[in-house]
């Protein structure tokens, strides 16, 4: 069964006004930044506020009990979505919180001279926490070389040693869009006793994820990139890893008991990583988004994005005025520049035509040195994008040299 984006658009309120925004065609191609939300997700989130607002894990009355059931039910749905056990799923505010929780939680495992392996294509969220932890611990940051813009088993082997304690990589780069062989890379990391952290921000929304199959130690991802609300995400960890992980946040409900002498007993996992009042409505919305994506089917999503991507790459190349930095990637991310036009100027021109793309360094501020380019344009597709969206991108990119006509009209 193929995916019909025009049929799916009826599920999204952003497309309710003839697919226009402020008089412009609504050609939204910035899905790697955030995605539109379907009615079913918004309704699920709103149901918490409308029907049974109360806190979770704090009340001994019927209303609070119903909230507990909904919140833990959301955890069960998300766990099934990624192939995890239910007590291995911790709710966070998003990918950034998850990675910071891991970095600071793993700090006690690091000694001076230990190595943390990253790549130059990582998002700031998967670089800056490790920078800080390396500074505190005396550990060393090393970079896995990109081979033809990819991380391969061979490139990891080239820097892997017994000193490696953590390997933390995005399964899909938010700029280059190549997909890692996570299972193979994870096995290599484990061969020297290193912990493998998977940043799934750009992979979980687009393809089936199975943490048992890949054997990763930790996985983090954000809901807002997969049709779920803002402010909700997931930190998955193997049980034994979570039990050994030091919490980053301390407060209500993450403890079983504490005393005046400073002694503290932690709650069981996963609740020890959920201090304070949680985003209950967001968790419910995330669970509904998981169900929505499973209903469409990841095979359908992958195939649809590949068709959109091929049409975009072929069209931009046929224009004769574009440089594409990831022409053979296997995801819905196309990163390019219009020759002779600064990325932000070209993106501004495209935006004036209703084609909304991202421009700049995309929070991957080590990558410009690799690409020998200070800024790029990124078009990123999702399940509701159409071939007509791609054609508009291609057609208007053909004329992006005329950006001054827009700014000085």
Image: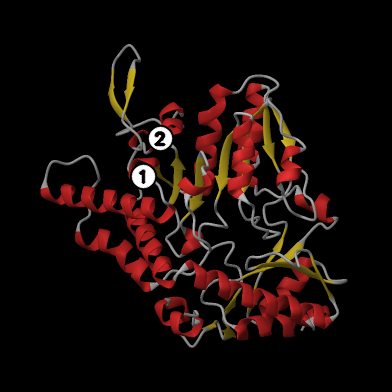
Is 404 on the left or on the right of 353, as rendered? right
Q: What mark, if any, has residue 85 been given in the picture?
A: 1
Q: Position of residue 190 (x, y in %)?
A: 59, 34
Q: Is residue 236 above or below residue 244?
A: below
Q: Residue furthest right?
A: 340
Q: Is residue 408 visible?
A: no
Quarter assignment of residue 86: top left
Q: Residue furthest top?
A: 261
Quick one: label 2, few (<14), some, or many (20+) residues within 10 Å? some
Quick one: label 1, few (<14), some, or many (20+) residues within 10 Å? some
- Between 154 and 89, the residue placed more toward the observer is 154
At 44% from the left and 26% from the top, the residue drawn is 244
**Element on which disc 1 rests:** loop
Q: Which residue is mark 2?
A: 239
Is 40 on the left or on the right of 48, as rendered? right
Q: Position of residue 60 (x, y in %)?
A: 13, 41
Q: Is residue 371 visible?
A: yes
User: How much space separates mark 1 and mark 2, taking CA atoms?
Assistant: 9 Å
Q: Position of residue 94 (x, y in %)?
A: 48, 49
The C terminus - image quarter? bottom right
Q: Is residue 108 above or below residue 297?
A: above
Q: Contact, CB < 8 Å: mark 1 with mark 2?
A: yes
Which numbered disc flags the more N-terminal residue, 1 or 2? 1
**Element on which disc 2 rests:** helix
Quarter assignment of residue 393: bottom right
At 39% from the left and 36% from the top, the residue drawn is 273
């Amino acid at each position: 069964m193929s995916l019909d984006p025009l049929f799916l658009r009826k599920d999204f309120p952003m497309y309710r006004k003839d697919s226009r925004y402020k008089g412009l065609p609504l050609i939204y191609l910035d899905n790697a930044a955030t995605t539109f939300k379907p009615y079913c997700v918004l309704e699920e989130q709103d149901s918490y506020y409308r029907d049974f607002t109360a806190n979770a894990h704090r009340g001994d009355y019927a209303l609070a009990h119903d909230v507990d059931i909904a919140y833990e039910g959301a955890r069960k749905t998300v766990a099934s979505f990624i192939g995890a056990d239910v007590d291995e799923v911790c709710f966070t505010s998003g990918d950034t919180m998850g990675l910071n929780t891991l970095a600071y939680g793993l700090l006690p495992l690091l000694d001076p001279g230990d190595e943390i392996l990253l790549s130059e294509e990582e998002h700031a969220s998967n670089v800056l926490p490790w920078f800080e932890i390396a500074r505190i611990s005396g550990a060393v940051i090393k970079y896995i070389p990109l081979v033809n813009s990819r991380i391969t088993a061979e490139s990891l082997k080239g820097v892997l040693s017994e000193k490696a304690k953590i390997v933390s990589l995005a399964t899909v780069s938010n700029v280059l869009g190549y997909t890692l062989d996570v299972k193979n890379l994870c096995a290599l990391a484990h061969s020297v006793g290193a912990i493998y952290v998977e940043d799934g921000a750009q992979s979980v929304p687009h393809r089936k994820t199975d943490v048992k199959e890949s054997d990763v130690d930790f996985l983090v991802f954000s809901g807002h990139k997969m049709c779920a609300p803002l402010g909700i995400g997931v930190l998955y960890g193997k049980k034994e890893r979570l039990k050994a992980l030091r919490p980053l946040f301390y407060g209500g409900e993450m403890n079983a008991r504490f005393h005046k002498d400073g002694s503290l007993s932690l709650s069981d996992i996963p609740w020890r990583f959920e201090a304070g009042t949680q985003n209950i409505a967001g968790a419910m919305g995330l669970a509904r988004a998981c169900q929505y994506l499973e209903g469409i089917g990841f095979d359908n999503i992958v195939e649809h994005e590949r068709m959109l991507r091929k049409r975009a790459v072929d069209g931009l190349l046929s224009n004769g005025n574009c440089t594409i930095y990831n022409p053979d990637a296997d995801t819905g991310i196309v990163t390019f520049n219009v020759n002779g036009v600064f990325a932000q100027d070209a993106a501004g021109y495209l935006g004036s035509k209703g084609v909304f793309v991202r421009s700049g360094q995309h929070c991957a501020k080590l990558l410009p040195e690799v690409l020998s380019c200070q800024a790029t344009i990124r078009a990123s597709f999702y399940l509701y994008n159409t071939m007509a969206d791609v054609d508009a991108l291609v057609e208007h990119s053909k004329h992006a040299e005329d950006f001054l006509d827009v700014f000085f009209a």
